[in-house]
Image (cartoon, grey):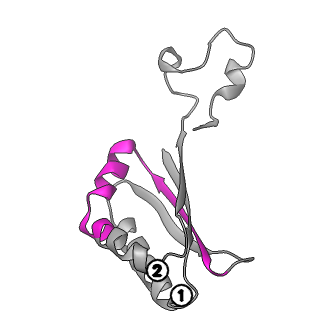
């Protein structure tokens, strides 16, 4: 599973319009194959900071998301609503069933077993 976390500083003027665009983006994205979760949240300490939380079943599903018409439209609208830089992080969640032969961790390390099932980014 792929998890994306993003933060969007939005302009206070036009805030309601920005929120509406983000609601539309979330609604369309949730309909995509492989989308598990796609939600924007308004910050409690700063109502002009919107956080994005996405979960995708695979890298391929996420890559397909980037090619959708609604993503292209949303990216085109961002400059008018942003009040700063967007910051994103991507995490890959691996289960304990993943093949240890392909793991990036040293299997002979004492901490190898404790890494199974953890978030790796």
Q: Secondary structure at mark 1?
A: helix
Numbered badge on residue 15: 1
Q: Residues within 10 Å of mark 2 (few under 14, many from 20)?
A: some
Magenta region, residue range: 47-72
- Point out residue 83 in the picture as x, y percentages from the top left corner: 54, 76
| Residue for point 50% across, 83% down | 19
| Residue for point 53% across, 55% down | 88
Residue 53: in magenta span: yes
Q: To which residue does mark 2 refer?
A: 81
Q: Which of 112/88 is in front? A: 88
Left or right, residue 12 beside residue 62: right
- Point out residue 87 in the picture as x, y percentages from the top left corner: 55, 58
| Residue for point 32% across, 72% down | 76
- Point out residue 92 in the picture as x, y percentages from the top left corner: 52, 40
Q: Is residue 65 above or below residue 11?
A: above
Q: Is residue 79 above or below residue 14?
A: above
Q: Secondary structure at mark 2?
A: helix
Q: Which of 7/82 is in front? A: 82
* Quadrant of the image containing the C terminus: top right
Residue 59: in magenta span: yes
């Amino acid at each position: 599973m792929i998890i994306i976390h993003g933060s969007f500083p939005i302009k206070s003027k036009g805030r309601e319009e920005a929120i509406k665009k983000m609601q539309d983006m979330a609604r369309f994205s949730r309909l995509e194959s492989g989308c598990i979760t796609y939600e924007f949240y308004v910050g409690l300490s700063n109502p002009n900071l919107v956080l994005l939380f996405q979960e995708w079943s695979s890298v391929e599903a996420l890559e397909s998301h980037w090619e959708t018409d609604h993503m292209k439209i949303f990216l085109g609208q961002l400059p008018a609503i942003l009040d700063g830089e967007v910051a994103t992080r991507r995490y890959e969640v691996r289960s304990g069933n993943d093949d240890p032969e392909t793991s990036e961790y040293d299997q002979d390390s004492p901490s190898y077993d404790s890494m199974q099932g953890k978030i790796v980014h």
